Amino acid sequence: MSMIAAFYGGKSILITGATGFLGKVLIEKLCRTSPDLKVIYILVRPKAGHTLQQRVSQIINTKLFEKVREVCPNLHEKIRAISADLNQNDFAISKEDMQELLSCTNIIFHCAATVRFDDHLRHAVQLNVTATQQLLFMASQMPKLEAFIHISTAFSNCNLKHIDEVIYPCSVEPKKIIDSMEWWDDAIVDEIAPKLMGDWPNTYTYTKALGEMVVQQESGNLNIAIIRPSIVGATWQEPFPGWVDNLNGPNGMIVAAGRGFLRAIRASPLAVADLIPVDTVINLTLAVGWYTAVHRPKSTLIYHCTSGNLNPCNWGKMGCQVLSTFEKIPFEKAFRRPHADFTANTITVHYWNAVSHRAPAMIYDIYLWLTGRKPRMTKLMNRLLRTISMLEYFINRSWEWSTYNTEMLMSELSPEDQRIFNFDVRQLNWLEYIENYVLGVKKYLLKEDMAGIPEAKQHLRRLRNIYYLFNTVFFLIAWRLLIARSQIARNVWFFIVSFCYKFLSYFRASSTLKA
Ligand SMILES: CCCCCCCCCCCCCCCCCCCCCCCC(=O)SCCNC(=O)CCNC(=O)[C@H](O)C(C)(C)COP(=O)(O)OP(=O)(O)OC[C@H]1O[C@@H](n2cnc3c(N)ncnc32)[C@H](O)[C@@H]1OP(=O)(O)O
Ligand SMILES: NC(=O)C1=CN([C@@H]2O[C@H](COP(=O)(O)OP(=O)(O)OC[C@H]3O[C@@H](n4cnc5c(N)ncnc54)[C@H](OP(=O)(O)O)[C@@H]3O)[C@@H](O)[C@H]2O)C=CC1
């Protein structure tokens, strides 16, 4: 019998960020392995045109929940959506709902965050810091609470090279920043943001670091643990390989490369690609929830959920495997044939951006304009290049994360729990994982049918022919213009023609002699 699965039986669990990427996989695994849990409260913000129940139904009626719908037929009753906005005071939760949450909750998984790199500092502080503070305050009023699990990121200290499982202080106290946000107007925030952020590359990583400090400072008597995943990718094994549903992190790059928009990127091929499958993160999260509640460690433990030090893979190897998968299972409606160059040289990057990204986009837009359609490719390309510029920081550096706590936890699990809640990334076969990842992007994110593969391959062959034709015509025109203007080019041309003529004459003469 799994100790972890049994632990969650009969429990009331509160999840924030349940409608997000990690949140969905968390609910799925919890309901599948502990179908006898009492209730999962999820804090969901209302969205225009969708009731809360519709938002829940949209999630649990997807393929991700196919298996769990069999194990737990009353899934709808297990999930109780509570209207809440983490940006509001008391999360705008009704009095009755708040009363129920305070009196019943046993475990909290805090996943909600803004993961946008370019969010305004005010908004990022509100969600990643102030909301965490408020949730901790709520938690302190919950008499039945056994554990509070906070999901952070391994990049909350990306300004350091070696990162231990400890909380590193930021130069300005989070409480001061929270207070200042009350009276600073946006102009002041904009001016002061770079100074506050120092060597953090974006508001996301900076506010996640502040969030960790808040957790440490406000922990009081609570049983708290922090999980720091690195770059979270598609599922590895569960409930099936390759599931992914958003464009964050590498997903958008895989789409852009597979559709032929992205052909070169400034990246160090030897830098470690610290990807971690989302099901691995969730298995660790559930194991940490159990361990924190049952063993009640004296201090807040931090768990790195990373792959680099246990089973490293670099961006070069990953990129090659992505490309070779495109050959077997190409994406539909490609703009150009997938091709990739990783380069660390800035001049080469500018060259590729001009020749491989902007020029084809402009030529295509001219074609759209000439055929009476609205040009859109240049705009799309600019947006892609902007996205890449934000991700570049993470693909040109390597970090070392120590994983003592994570390894300690692994050794504490029974063999059955190690199997059911497997977070041992040493068992991951990268080539197989990446192939399933690309397949998953095609099936679950782009919603493409596998039956369309022959047509997609045919389309790529057409693109190849257009490419050869375009290059030949371009070369001939360029050469013709050069010959017209330059005596040297004319001499070279006559030399080549006379050389070919002599070679052919010699070849013909020798074959006549042999006959
Ligand atoms: C040539 C080389 C290729 C090699 C072969 C293949 C390569 C594949 C292998 C891997 C390549 C290397 C890529 C590695 C990337 C590494 C990422 C590392 C990140 C680590 C960070 C730490 C992890 C975390 O803790 S948090 C999770 C990460 N968070 C994010 O990723 C969020 C990032 N996103 C943002 O910050 C914003 O969305 C931003 C700034 C990128 C764009 O903002 P903007 O306001 O311009 O647009 P949106 O309103 O957000 O969206 C508009 C539009 O664009 C679509 N879109 C959004 N993001 C992407 C994307 N990444 N790619 C493509 N399209 C995207 C979005 O859906 C919208 O579409 P609509 O149709 O308009 O709705
Ligand atoms: N994805 C990754 O690569 C990594 C993620 N992490 C961490 O994991 C956690 C989950 O990330 P991920 O699932 O990818 O993020 P998503 O962006 O997919 O999900 C974010 C969740 O937060 C919710 N949320 C945002 N704003 C509010 C609000 N004002 N009120 C209520 N809910 C809100 C969203 O709800 P809604 O559906 O309404 O928008 C959504 O459910 C985050 O803490 C992140 O920092 C850490 C490392 C890597």
Image (tube, rainbow, N blue to C red):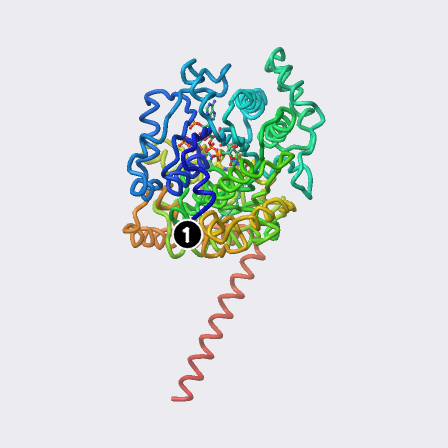
Residue 294, position as x, y percentages in the image: 54, 38
Left or right: residue 365 compared with residue 400: left
In which quadrant will I find the C terminus?
bottom left
Q: Which residue is mark 1?
A: 436
Query: Residue 484 versus residue 243: which sits nearer the camera?
Result: 243
Residue shown at the point (57%, 51%) measured from the top left: 411
Residue shown at the point (58%, 24%) measured from the top left: 129
Query: Residue 466 versus residue 253: which sits nearer the camera?
Result: 253
Badge 1 crowding class, 10 Å Cα cut-off, few under 14, some 14 to 19, many 20 or more, is many
Residue 210, position as x, y percentages in the image: 63, 27
The single residue placed furthest to the right in the displayed view is: 171
Residue shown at the point (41%, 18%) measured from the top left: 97
Which amino acid type is marked by label 1? Asn
Total numbered circles: 1
Q: Is residue 295 visible?
A: yes
Query: Residue 339 versus residue 47: which sits nearer the camera?
Result: 47
Q: Is residue 126 visible?
A: no
Left or right: residue 196 compared with residue 501: right
The single residue placed furthest to the top in the displayed view is: 183
Give the quadrant of residue 304.
top right
Residue 106, position as x, y percentages in the image: 48, 29
Answer above or below: position of 371 versus 260. Answer: above
Answer above or below: position of 496 versus 29. Answer: below
Residue 510, position as x, y percentages in the image: 45, 84
Q: Secondary structure at mark 1?
A: helix
Answer above or below: position of 191 versus 280. Answer: above
